[in-house]
Amino acid sequence: MAPHDIRRPFKRAAISDQQKRRELSLLRQAQNRRDAQQQARCLASSILSLQSAAPESQPEQSDTEIETVPESEQESEAFSKDLDVRQASKLRGPEVRKWFARQLMLPEWMIDVPDRLAQDWYVFARPAGKRCFVVSSNGTTVSRQRNGSILHHFPSALPAGAKIRDGSGSAQSYCILDCIFHELDQTYYVIDMVCWNGYSLYDCTAEFRFYWLNSKLEESGACNAPSHYHKFRFSAVPVYNCDSSGLYSAYTGVVPYAKDGLLFYNKHALYQTGNTPLALVWKDENCSQYVIDTDGKGEIPSQQQVVLELQDDRKLVTSDDPPVLFGCLDGDIIEKSGLHTGNLLRFAIGDGGLSFADGKLEKADLIYLGKSNRARAFADSYSKVLFQFMVRHSPLKIDDLLASINSANDQEKTPSDIEMVG
Amino acid sequence: MEVTQVLFNAQSIDGTVRKNAEESLKQFQEQNLPGFLLSLSGELANEEKPIETRKLAGLILKNALDAKEQHRKFELVQRWLSLDATAKSQIKACLLQTLSSPVFDAHSTTSQVIAKVAGIELPQKQWPELIGSLLSNVHQIPAYAKQATLETLGYLCEEVSPDVIDQDQVNKILTAVVQGMSTSEGNIDVRLAATRALYNALGFAQANFSNDMERDYIMRVVCEATLSPEVRIRQAAFECLVSISSTYYEKLTPYIQDIFNITSKAVREDEEPVALQAIEFWSSICDEEIDILEEYGGEFTGDSDVPCFYFIKKALPALVPMLLETLLKQEEDQDQDEGAWNIAMAGGTCLGLVAQTVGDDIVPLVVPFVEENITKPDWRQREAATYAFGSILDGPSPENLIPLVNVALTFMLSALTKDPNSHVKDTTAWALGRIFEFLLGSAVDLPIITQANCQQIVTVLLQSMKDTPNVAEKACGALYFLAQGYEGEGEPSPLTPFFQEIVQSLLTVTHREDVGDSRLRTAAYETLNEVVRCSTVETAPLVLQLVAVIMMELHNTLESQKLSSEEREKQSELQGLLCGCLQVIIQKLGSSETTKYAFMQYADQIMGLFLRVFACRSATVHEEAMLAIGALAYATGADFAKYMPEFYRYLEMGLQNFEEYQVCAVTVGVVGDISRALEEKIVPYCDGIMTQLLKNLSSNQLHRSVKPPIFSCFGDIALAVGEYFEKYLMWAMSALQSAADLSTHIAGDDELVEYTNSLRNGILEAYSGIFQGFKNSPKTQLLIPYAPHILQFLDGIYMEKDMDDMVMKTAIGVLGDLADTLGNHASSMIQQSVSSKDFLNECLSSEDLLVKESAQWAKLAISRAISV
């Protein structure tokens, strides 16, 4: 029986880095497993919370519908219906992307200036970054990008966004924010508020939503600097009435983020998922780095490119509802390239360009390039194609917008004159 | 067979002779075990035989009864138990007889053999007369017989667990042992043997320590033994005190004052081995009190097992000066010697534990010592002062420490560059590391690092990396904690501007000529890892540049050829560090979409290097490379399929590595990563993987901790391949079912409960993956036959009431998955289960949000299944 060794670690850290590496790996694996399971169950906490928050949800649709109905027809369907867990939970891979993409309100591109811009619209500079849904519930916060992938999983000061608040973290409490994550300052810029603290804002006007956003976000502490229980800073963006000074401020004003165009929101519009003409995006070189679309290599192609969906009768259409017809595809190409209905195809617009009659598209000079990138969920929208076309040929300038506001102002001031002329 | 000759030959210097002898012994053992054991015990007992053969006979006997490997040990025990009773009693008689041999080697080996036999037989209620006959020996006249008997009792107590010996016999053993220790025993060897025996017997003395009179007696004798003129007895007696301090902490109050006097005298005056034990007594008391205070948060309630008696707090005014004195007794070169352990080191370690135990109270007792000594010309005083300061940084409140640190920091930075003594610099760098380790971070509002001093801190640390290897290693360590202090902070890290410089310096350290002789290279790479882990988005391009650099390093290790075995070992260690570093980088860059995209350009090359690392080890795969591949699979996603044809055999090799079960466990985790990355593309490899996993489950040689992750891995695979899992369903389900049965009815210690819960969690994750994988498949009905058992299992573990939150969450999730996938096929079954009512309700009102979330899912899924 020899004496017992009593040596203790001296000037040594309690844990080795190798052990730390192992543990971090296990943590990552457990997290990935949880994500995979949740995706299978479609138990993203958002869905359950939304489910319970949407008692007005429409009667259940049949199971098959989601797989067979072409997406273009679903774009405008009500959010509540899409929230049915039973349907959402069946989604895998590309369907998940489509499902999430459908939850966001997507602005159309501004191809002409809407009436009553100064009276009925807000304007603000859109932050450059990743558009995502931020959902806080049950003590955690998850941000999901348009393609459904999780951007961050983190604690936040949003109601129910971290595990520190007792009481306020009831099951009914949750938030859904429409955000753009700005990489450079690691900030979520909140561009719209969809649900706050269990209260749904879907059916509220933009006017109310923006008012609510500005008062509640600050109050919650979500705009504070990051800390242990609040990993990312949130920030509202300055929103202006779209009169000439408001438009000018949004266009030239200094903001802490890189701008990517201007967003126009109709004050009376409810939060509508999918493409809507009640939200518009516009940009030029002064307020965005990305005015003209680039190709996969980040270069501007010499000819404009568009992605269209191939339909049954060889028709090529946009993602709008109803779809806009751009032309028909040669039967030879369909056969040679093994194309099917529903394929998304890439075209260049040839020298013939687009021609219009009565404000409607009459003819497009399309040159077939091939199938589009697999990650694409939708064809281009009509407004996007047109905006891109105009940018290359006769762009809608900031002066045009200002002029439109000013001329409308003049008209407002002299309503009787108009009557007299009429 | 002439055993003596063979035993002689077995110790021959001639290799051939030795080998032949060993071979014939082995044959003898295999062909005639009772004969073999009898001959050996006869040899051992025979006073006419030479010492060498008797000793070897005893050793072989011992090895025929016990082995390190669990399954081998089990086998040997079974073989002994099945031996003929007559042979056994003959052998045991020989052994008892040999115990009284005057030849030291004979009786000393015998006492160990007897303990081994006792270890097998006493739990079986055999050899009841053993303890009686040993105790009758204690009164024998020859001192050597007494000594041998006490040693045997000591070994016996080490071998068997307290519950197999009656209290009556325990009393007799303790009486004999304590009498042997007492001052009335004239023979030093007997007293020493008794003192060492008591050390092992203390675990048997629960009842005796509850009896005031008996406890007083034992404590008196132990304390007296600490004053023995024989140093070995004093040392053994202090060892007993150390053991008592943890086993009978709550009984110490009446003795603590005396023990303090004894220990402090020993620390100041006695020889080092004794002084070290005396310090260890207080370190051990600290361990106890830290545990108690941590568990109860300082508030003693009626439910608490053991109250805190605050011995350390009460002893503080005398204890701290005693420990500070020891700090001045450094050895010249202790920092260069990995194995060093001396009184200054033990005292310093104890001081750190005291600080953790009492917190703020230690500060005013140590600060004057630091102030007085820190500028003295004698390096010992400067070093002791620095060590004292470093050791109190963990424990006291930051509010109390930070003002001190802000004063000390400039001085320390200057000492680290300018002090002429390497020992002082080593300790200074270590103390800086402690400052960063315990005082940085978001919990504390008072800043230590400012824009103003950050530059200087970094410069000094990087400069110290060029110092002697031990100082450089501590400087790396300090930088590790400095980087860690800004981990996960949202705001820009003040280290960001220095990122490139830091990385460059660390890489330079790894190329130092003298890097191989110490821990320095490991420290440099570990620090590099932490710097990468804690880097921010601004420095992502620099991390990306690092990929190519580390890849080149790894490539270089693969080019060197014709290495000696020692060089090969060093090379493998370096490859481990480089793979570890790549793993950290991959995980970092893979966690954000933008950096992941940029990183992917290297994926092919990195994978190529990992495969070469595997290839240059013949028998085993490299754990670090395997971990790195897991991270790579996660980052690569479905594209990982292209590496599978070449990687697969290493994956299989990893799964087969039972010896290094960590490697096996890591590989199982990687199978999960690959399943999630490849989804249905993993199908071609599933046959091999599933076969191996099932084999692993049924093996009793594989460490049990690997089994729960294997079950979880079933779930990962099933979720990835969907209905294709049908092929394995029967086998997987049957393995799950039998594991489930085993994990329902358990009774045992905390460790077993913890293991059982991890096993349940694995089983449940497997069920979840299988149900979700089969969802919406026409083959869903294949699962229906398994549903009753699964529901029973859920009910079963619910009734046991010993689930932790993790299991609760997974279990209630499985209920949801079952309902979700089977729908109305299972609705009546579900409605009949307890789980769907009480268990579900309990989970719905759980405090744990993950449990609640799972329960809400289950509720929803069940309501749908029932309503359809």
Image (spheres, helix red, strand yellow):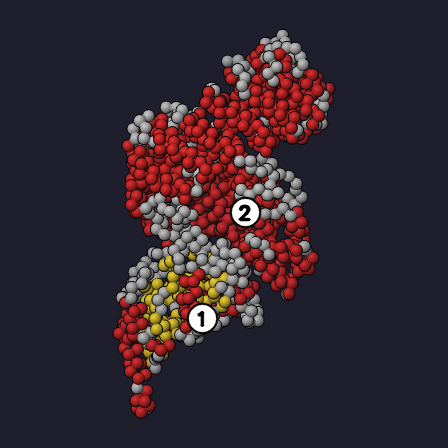
The answer to whether residue A260 is visible is: yes
Disc 2 marks a residue whose amino acid type is Cys
Q: Chain of mark 2?
A: B
**Within the image, what quadrant is residue B330 found in?**
top left
> In the rendering, which numbered label is found on residue A271?
1
Whether residue B727 appears in this view of the structure is no
Q: Position of residue A31 (x, y in %)?
A: 49, 50
Which of the numbered marks, if any, corresponds to residue B69?
A: none
Residue A15 placement (x, y as % from top left): 46, 38
Depth check: B268 or B475 in front? B268
Query: Quadrant of residue A380 in the image?
Result: bottom left
Nearer the observer, B205 or B359:
B359
SS for callout 1: loop
State the residue position of label 2: B713
Which residue type does callout 1 highlight? Tyr
Q: How many residues crowd mark 2 within 10 Å: few (<14), some (14–19), many (20+)?
A: many
Q: Position of residue B57 (x, y in %)?
A: 60, 16
Q: Name the foreground residue: B409 vs B492.
A: B409
Residue B77, relative to residue A263: is it above or below?
A: above
Q: Mark 1 or mark 2, which is nearer to you?
A: 1
